[in-house]
Amino acid sequence: MSEQLQTQEVRDIIKDIFDRQMPYHQLIGLNISCYENNKIELKIAMKPELVGNIMHGILHGGVTASMLDVAGGMIVFSDVLENMEDLSKEAVMKRLQNLGTIDLRIDYLRPGRGEEFTATATVIRTGNKVAVARMELHNEKGDHIAFGTGTYMVG
Amino acid sequence: MSEQLQTQEVRDIIKDIFDRQMPYHQLIGLNISCYENNKIELKIAMKPELVGNIMHGILHGGVTASMLDVAGGMIVFSDVLENMEDLSKEAVMKRLQNLGTIDLRIDYLRPGRGEEFTATATVIRTGNKVAVARMELHNEKGDHIAFGTGTYMVG
Amino acid sequence: MSEQLQTQEVRDIIKDIFDRQMPYHQLIGLNISCYENNKIELKIAMKPELVGNIMHGILHGGVTASMLDVAGGMIVFSDVLENMEDLSKEAVMKRLQNLGTIDLRIDYLRPGRGEEFTATATVIRTGNKVAVARMELHNEKGDHIAFGTGTYMVG
Amino acid sequence: MSEQLQTQEVRDIIKDIFDRQMPYHQLIGLNISCYENNKIELKIAMKPELVGNIMHGILHGGVTASMLDVAGGMIVFSDVLENMEDLSKEAVMKRLQNLGTIDLRIDYLRPGRGEEFTATATVIRTGNKVAVARMELHNEKGDHIAFGTGTYMVG
């Protein structure tokens, strides 16, 4: 039987994958600052390449969508892990491969002005096959920039 | 009175702005291949930095969201232009600054496999203040990768 | 082994259930006018009780949402039936019990003015567990009143 | 100049309109139990006519959508009132006529089982033209049945 990991050890491995091994996350500078039970926090530092509106110098809506999508996916997967009995690396990786976004709604509340943006998420529905998360994006001043709802395939 | 442009001339200027002067579009390699009355086409060539899933080598959902958001915004703005009387550069730029995404829904239909992705869009509601567009993403084989609906502030 | 039905026979049974045995459908006067392979059509005749805005006399947005939700669910279930091997009544009813709306987006395009409203739907994603449909509502003049996207649990 | 009302007086008038003068609300038994600054509460008692699934006896998803749509519209209008200078009946009614749902997303979290359902809502974006609300539906046991996000035209 494969070595069984603790749930937090698994989250640390996944955090590392999303933080360092996802080429697109490297491209935009996405950093996973926290991944614990019921808690996910992603950060991105504003940089010229992320600007979507040269007149206003604000964050491109696609970056916002990217951050919220990832935050939602990771928080629902954290919930999946809490309910898995076999926490071998093989079992976890197999389950992770099934994780996928079914649909995503983003509400853009305010222009994306700021120096650092933080995405957080909470699970609002858990199921064997489908889970739903609610996500938020704030800047370093605490302004609520965007709000999201994502439905994810989890099984 | 300012020089009045033809609607297509205006679209060509905007196409150039979105194609060459949006830092994030440069970063991900987004190309505006067509911008005409009732027609928008954005293309992106797959490249390693856009991968969101190293196990499957597929396009990151955030790139999909970015493309559909831009396609929707551009198609509704094309409609705005058709109804503007003053087509001076100042008037157009002022109106363009008011363009913003209110909310966006993305339906991820298939994994983003392919070498080139094309986003298209059509307007489904036009108003003085708010417009709604429907967007689609296909790969080079014609597989329907994603579908979107966006509500935009236009006035 | 249970008697095997033809797919269209099954659709006729389901059409009858949704048309005559759903109390809420009776309450609002929802009629299933067509249920065939790849085709669903629901109709509702305007009546005073469905008005949501006494000043304008227009259809309540909740009726619109109800019609689009049902249209989407029925069209994805039609697709499920096409892929089922065991078409006994027991197998079909069991599968029907699993049918459920996960999430729904409605875009209200125009005020719901008219004498008769028709909802139609098409499948845009089929899967073993989850399916996505696109729905539309028109009035008797062909005005496009609303547009919807629904994600449904199908397995 | 017209008689100026207090904001809560206006809300009481609107509460009465939505509670007693909307034919569809009468049809489904929708009751506005509270409408104050930053607070809206709608209730509906389960009754046979609202059943959408005879096998399970649960609330029709269209009723859920109806309740969440109304809750969201009323809460954003409460915010509009807080910012209006002219609170004459004419000014308020004119503004109320402009209130309309642009788009609505409903996430169905659990089957609608229960004897009484309560919808609540909070504003997450306020603007001169467009506002966004988040809505929730719970049953009498506090089970979270559905979650919604609505974008409304307010000006």
Image (cartoon, coloured by chain):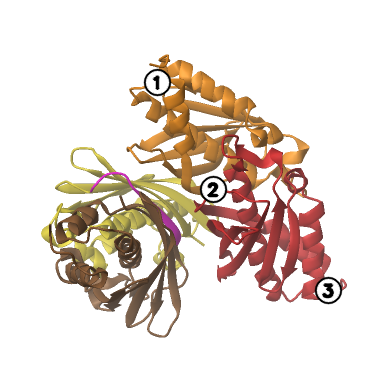
Chain colours: A red, B orange, C yellow, D brown
Mark 1 nearby-residue class (10 Å; few <14, some 14–19, many ≥20): many
Q: Is residue B101 left or right of residue D77?
A: right
- Judge whether residue D7 can be spotted in this image: yes
Residue found at x 57% / y 61%: A135
Indicate yes or no whether the magenta region holds residue C102.
yes
Q: Is residue B127 above or below residue B18?
A: below
Q: Indicate which label's residue lies in the foreground, 3 or 1.
A: 1
Instruction: Find disc 3 in the rendering and name its residue.
Output: A5
Q: In which quarter of the image is residue D17?
A: bottom left
- Residue nearer the viewer, B144 or B105: B105
Amino acid on which the number 2 mark rests in the picture: Pro
Q: Where is residue C142 in the image (x, y as percent from the top left)?
A: 23, 37
What label sits on residue B87 in the rendered view? 1
Instruction: Find disc 2 in the rendering and name its residue.
Output: A111
The answer for which chain carries disc 1 is B
In magenta, the rendered stretch is C101-111
Outermost residue to the front: D1
The answer for which chain carries disc 3 is A
